Amino acid sequence: MSATTNPTWLMLGASSAVARAFAREAASHGAGILLAGRDMDDLERQAADLAIRHGVPAAPVPFDARDLGSHRAFAEDCAARAGGPLNVFLAFGVMPDQAEADADPDAAAAMVEANFTGAVTVLAALAPVLEAQGQGTVVALGSVAGDRGRKRNYTYGATKAALLTYLQGYAARLSGAGVKVLCIKAGPVDTGMTWPLPKLPFMASPPAFARAAWARAAKGGGDAYIPGIWWPVMTIIRHIPTRVFNRLNI
């Protein structure tokens, strides 16, 4: 992921624990950082810490995944701010309880808009920037939940399955421009999103996840499970017969 000029990583959803960890990982390799999100006070503190700790340019940028009409201007602003080739790390998303999504159509719609529609519109807005520079890497945070609809979180899983399909086509579009697109099928990460849930297996810490994501992105695009143990686990889950699967509380 090197170039003559050090790249700038745009962190979409920069206040999330995973994005924070990936920003620190990228900065430790000399990359400039653009921290995009809604909590500008938090992003300003992060930017100052990255600049002091790693000696790289870092700046906050206001961004709202659900403000779809702002995404084109946002992409143009980020392109102007980047000190080198622009790379993208997409980490925003919400995961309310499935019961809440079942009971409240507005909650379900908000999750779809935040997790999928917002991702599509901002990535579409960034595509011309990536094509024009003729290089770059896009890393998007998917989920093992997208591999099969489970009763505990099927609406969330559906947004991640849709995102994977979109990213596959997005990768095909950008491949001719030399841009790599990687969808990370993440298992549970020890963040605020998972704290309310029961103890989950194979939980990764944000720093360990970020190191693995950085190393995998250096190998190219496609999709990958992190931690890798989820590849055999999800292979088994995908192949459980429906009549058995529907009786499982997973």
Image (cartoon, grey):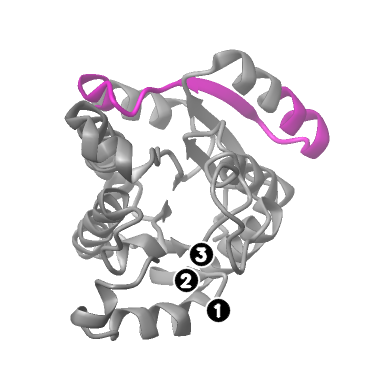
| Residue, disc 3 | 217
Write down the region rendered in magenta.
48-71
For the point 38% across and 41% down, the residue is 97
At label 1, the amino acid type is: Ile
Q: Is residue 83 visible?
A: yes
Residue 9 located left or right of residue 51: left
Tell which circle, 3 or 1, labels the residue nearer the N-terminal end. 3
Which of the pair 202/15 is nearer the observer? Answer: 202
Contact check, label 3 and label 2, Cβ < 8 Å: no
Hey, which quadrant is residue 106 in on the image? Answer: top left
What residue is drawn where x is 34% and y is 24%?
A: 74
Q: List x then y, in percent, for residue 177.
A: 28, 59
Q: Badge 2: how crowded within 10 Å, few (<14), some, or many (20+)?
A: many
Mark 2 residue type: Tyr
Q: Are marks 3 and 1 in contact (CB under 8 Å)?
A: no
Q: Is residue 134 above or below residue 27?
A: below
Circles 1 and 2 in contact, beta carbons < 8 Å: yes
Distance in Å between CA atoms under marks 3 and 1: 18 Å
Between 21 and 173, the residue placed more toward the observer is 21
From the top left corner, tell me how far across and down residue 244 is, in percent: 26, 81
Element under disc 3: helix
- The tag on residue 176 is none
**Which numbered marker is on residue 225?**
2
